[in-house]
Image (cartoon, rainbow, N blue to C red):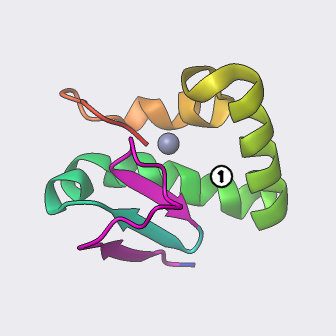
Amino acid sequence: MKPIIKTLKHWPRPLPQNRSAVTIYPFILFRTPEARRKWLDHEMVHIAQVEEKGWFRFYSSYIWHHLRYGYKGNKYEEEASHKDPVDKNRSE
Ligand SMILES: [Zn+2]
């Protein structure tokens, strides 16, 4: 499925406040057009991960890895990081 990509004027509270992009399948949400340019490839890896595992299995496993290993140690983020921009400041 083709993701629904949005750049939000307001970044609501429930979204991670220290991130500039987040994938909540089938949506990819960006904080700014610049974030969209930088992080689209990374977020597309998460789209593929959801499509491979299924929505519930992916997000429950993602959250488990996040709590257990943190953002950087999360295997899903590790895989997506191969698509990160060279000048990354903030991630998702
Ligand atoms: Zn990510």
* Left or right for 91, reference 15: left
> Is 18 contained in the magenta span?
yes
* Left or right for 54, reference 30: right
Up-down relation of residue 21 to residue 88 (above or below): below
Query: Residue extending furthest front?
Result: 13
- Majority SS type along the magenta span: loop
Residue at mark 1: C-beta within 8 A of ligand 1: no
Name the quadrant containing residue 25: bottom right
Residue under the image location 65 percent in, 28 percent down: 74
Residue type marked 1: Gln
Residue under the image location 38 percent in, 53 percent down: 21
Residue under the image location 74 percent in, 54 percent down: 59
Residue under the image location 25 percent in, 35 percent down: 85
On the image, the x and y values in percent for residue 64 come to: 80, 37
Name the quadrant containing residue 36: bottom left
> Start and end of the magenta stretch?
2-24
> Is 45 contained in the magenta span?
no
On the image, the x and y values in percent for residue 62 come to: 72, 43
For the C terminus, the image quarter is top left
Question: Which type of secondary structure does the marked residue at label 1 adopt?
Answer: helix
Q: Which residue is mark 1?
A: 49
For the N terminus, the image quarter is bottom right
On the image, the x and y values in percent for residue 76 come to: 63, 37
